[in-house]
Image: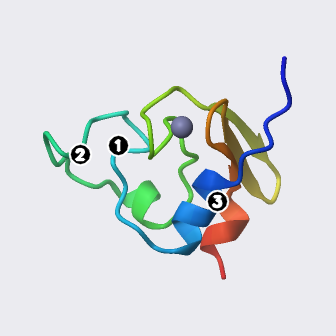
Amino acid sequence: MRPVTSTELRDFIFKGKPFLFDPYRGVDLTQEKPAPFKAAELGLEPFRYCPLCGRRMVTQVVPTGWTAICSRHGKISSYYFEH
Ligand SMILES: [Zn+2]
């Protein structure tokens, strides 16, 4: 597997741009707006889908939070949302 070096997704989140896809259900947010759920609002729920392209992410839950990787747009971490 090719290493993921893109920082596109991380940069996108740091800029606070609105997501294109729901990171928990993969829904296209330009088409519908799913109701938020509690764990997601608290930032506890790991991302399952890339907010930029809707691809399934490789998600890993660790003791301090979670990380998720999109093969196209790079890696993000729950750490990014805590600061
Ligand atoms: Zn992506």
Q: Secondary structure at mark 2?
A: loop
- Per the rendering, the mark at residue 21 is 1
Amino acid type at image mark 1? Phe
Q: Nearer the viewer, residue 21 or 15?
A: 15
* Amino acid under disc 2: Leu
Alpha-carbon neighbours of circle 2 within 10 Å: few (<14), some, or many (≥20)? some
**Which residue in the structure is indicated by mark 2?**
29
Marked residue nearer the N-terminal end (2 or 1) = 1
Residue 74, position in %: x, y? 69, 44
Q: Do the numbered discs 2 and 1 sit on residues whose CB atoms are within 8 Å?
A: yes
In the picture shown, does residue 68 fall above or below 57? below
Q: Position of residue 81 (x, y in %)?
A: 60, 71
**As drawn, which residue projects farthest toward the bottom?**
83
Residue corresponding to mark 3:
10
Residue 63 located left or right of residue 78: right
Query: Which quadrant holds the C terminus?
Result: bottom right
Q: CA distance from mark 3 to mark 1?
A: 15 Å
In the picture provided, is 9 more to the left or to the right than 4? Answer: left
